[in-house]
Amino acid sequence: MNPTHENPQDTRLRDALRAGSSSTRLEAALAIGTRADPAFVDALVARCAIEPDFFVRDMLTWALTRFPAETTVPRLLQELRSERAQARSQALHTLSKIGDRGAWPAITRSLLHDADDEVARSAWRAAVVLVPEGENRELAEDLAAQLGRGDRDLQRSLSRALVALGDVSEPALRTGLASDDPAVRAHARATEILLRDPDADFDAAVDEAKRIVALGPETAKGTRC
């Protein structure tokens, strides 16, 4: 539908998506998702790229999941080539929620290794959801190549992605455990702990891993109370 010929209610919804009040934008995204009118897909995707409020972004994603995948996925794939980091990260997040595995070829190594941490984090999560059978081992290797990256929160996200892939992550983690970089070894060790016990606390796993890396496995075992 051409926005210049749409009805007044649709015009109000489009205007509300750009309102100064985050609660107004949230209500507009909710209303659009409830109606699921495909004429709003472009407006929702465009707003995802610039929306500053986390809760509004979450509602925008929810609204997009209400449309048929064949309507939303092609538009989201276009966003993966955007120069705006938020456009890429939010598109990846939404693709992971839609879960259409036809989007898998668009989850490139450049996205998995994106210089922007939020884009990379979103790519990891999307990749784990969308990866087809037979390619999860290669994905695990790609993810494990980034062990030691970023702050503890980013490392937690990477560990959770590797754990979600299951046992295929073990060989890639062994490579990390043999790294010359103590930060990589500690992150690999912490991820290994989570792989054995997914309910374990990540911070405790990191602290334990750092102790093992610093003292060596046998010494660390001997000093444990």
Image (spheres, helix red, strand yellow):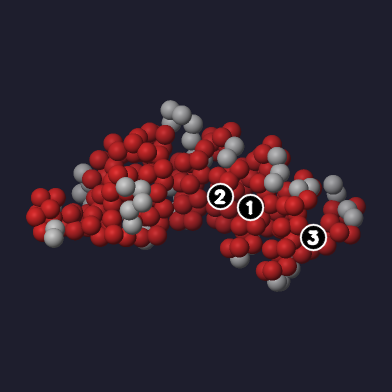
Q: Residues within 10 Å of mark 1 (few under 14, many from 20)?
A: many
* Residue 88 appearing in the image: no
Position of residue 31 measured from the top left corner of the image (x, y, whole percent):
76, 57
Q: Residues within 10 Å of mark 3 (few under 14, many from 20)?
A: some
The residue at 49%/56% (across/down) is: 118
Q: Quadrant of residue 85?
A: bottom right
The residue at 77%/45% (across/down) is: 38
> Do the numbered discs 2 and 1 sit on residues whose CB atoms are within 8 Å?
yes
Three-letter code, disc 2: His
Which secondary structure, mark 2? helix
Along the line of sight, the residue nearer the viewer: 183 or 55: 55
Q: Which residue is mark 1?
A: 61
Which secondary structure, mark 3? helix
Q: CA distance from mark 2 to mark 1?
A: 8 Å
Q: Is residue 164 left or right of residue 67?
A: left
Three-letter code, disc 1: Thr
Q: Which residue is mark 3?
A: 13
Q: Which residue is mark 2?
A: 93
